[in-house]
Amino acid sequence: MKQLLTLMLAALILFTSCTNYGKKAKSGNIEVYYKDGATKEQAQKTADLFLQALQASDPNDKTTKSFQLTKPGDTLIMKMVVADKARMNAAGDDAFYAMVGLISDSVYNGKPVNISFTDNKFKAFRTLTYDPARLLNFGVKVTSGNVEVYSKDGFSSEHAQMLADFLSKEMQPANTISFQVGMPEGQVYQVYMASSPEKAKNVTTENIQDLCSKMSKEVFNGVDLNFHFTDVRFKPFLSYSFDSVTDTIKVIN
């Protein structure tokens, strides 16, 4: 989930520049060193992924961000320099395991990836070891433009694609926005939008009502639904229920 990287780079981890730690791939102000079995292709994919996230979160940040990839065996190890341990600890392990899953899928074909937190000489002081049970399963992903939608709870990929196409056309986002959709047994449709409290407070109730009304009619055959603003792990911090009969919404938490 690209937005995960966006928010992690913007709010959780700061990096410092290092030298002489292997060959280097570069994308903008992101540099990824690679050695000991890691490939240039893997390093370049990592650099491109982080640059896209950084540009989406803070296009004015030109500070060099440095990483290192090694592959001493079957597991890819990504080292990241941590400038603020307190902020790293505040993020919580679940956020980093979500990142592990993203790097595994995007860079290493779904194979194991470990993340090591290091000083500015890539000396590790803590490592999170790949653990499939800890990886967050967002669901099956479909995309349309800069919208990505993860479907779960039996919600079909075809229906998720309809939602992605609608949201892409309706919102026309300049950067990637991530959604999750599902319908737990006995409940109404649930639509989750990864965001932040700062961004959510700038969205008016009228905007949410209009979006939910159109979404209900064009994607969900005119039924009720719940809409949630969430963190990057799709954990809600602000939720609305939409009543299709009265065409109104109300806050439910």
Image: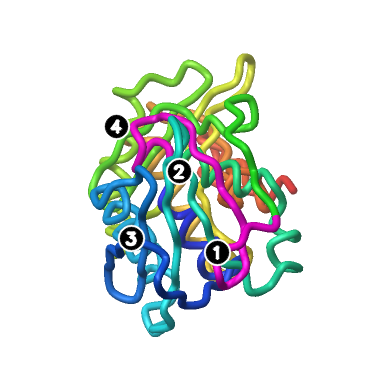
Sequence order check: which comes first, mark 4 or mark 3? Answer: 3
Q: Amino acid at mark 4?
A: Gln
In three-dimensional space, the C-alpha distance between marks 3 and 2, rounded to whole angstroms, equals: 24 Å
Q: Position of residue 82 (x, y in %)?
A: 62, 68
Q: Quadrant of residue 59?
A: bottom left
Q: Which residue is mark 3?
A: 47
Q: Is residue 156 above or below residue 204?
A: above
Mark 4: secondary structure: helix
Which is more foreground, mark 3 or mark 2?
3
> Which residue is rendered at x = 44% and y = 72% of the image?
65
Q: Amino acid at mark 1?
A: Phe
In three-dimensional space, the C-alpha distance between marks 4 and 2, rounded to whole angstroms, equals: 11 Å
Sequence order check: which comes first, mark 3 or mark 1? Answer: 3
Is 121 inside the magenta-drawn segment? yes
Is 93 inside the magenta-drawn segment? no
> Which residue is rendered at x = 38% and y = 19% of the image?
156
- The residue stretch that appears in magenta: 103-125
| Res. 248 visible in picture | yes
Camera-side residue of 188 and 193: 193
Which is more foreground, mark 3 or mark 1?
1
Q: Which residue is mark 1?
A: 122
In three-dimensional space, the C-alpha distance between marks 4 and 3, rounded to whole angstroms, equals: 29 Å
In three-dimensional space, the C-alpha distance between marks 3 and 1, rounded to whole angstroms, equals: 17 Å
> Which residue is rendered at x = 53% and y = 34% of the image?
245
In the image, is 118 to the left or to the right of 47? right
Q: Position of residue 90 (x, y in %)?
A: 75, 60
Q: Position of residue 19 (x, y in %)?
A: 41, 75
Q: Which residue is mark 4?
A: 161
Q: Which residue is mark 2?
A: 179
Which is more foreground, mark 1 or mark 2?
1
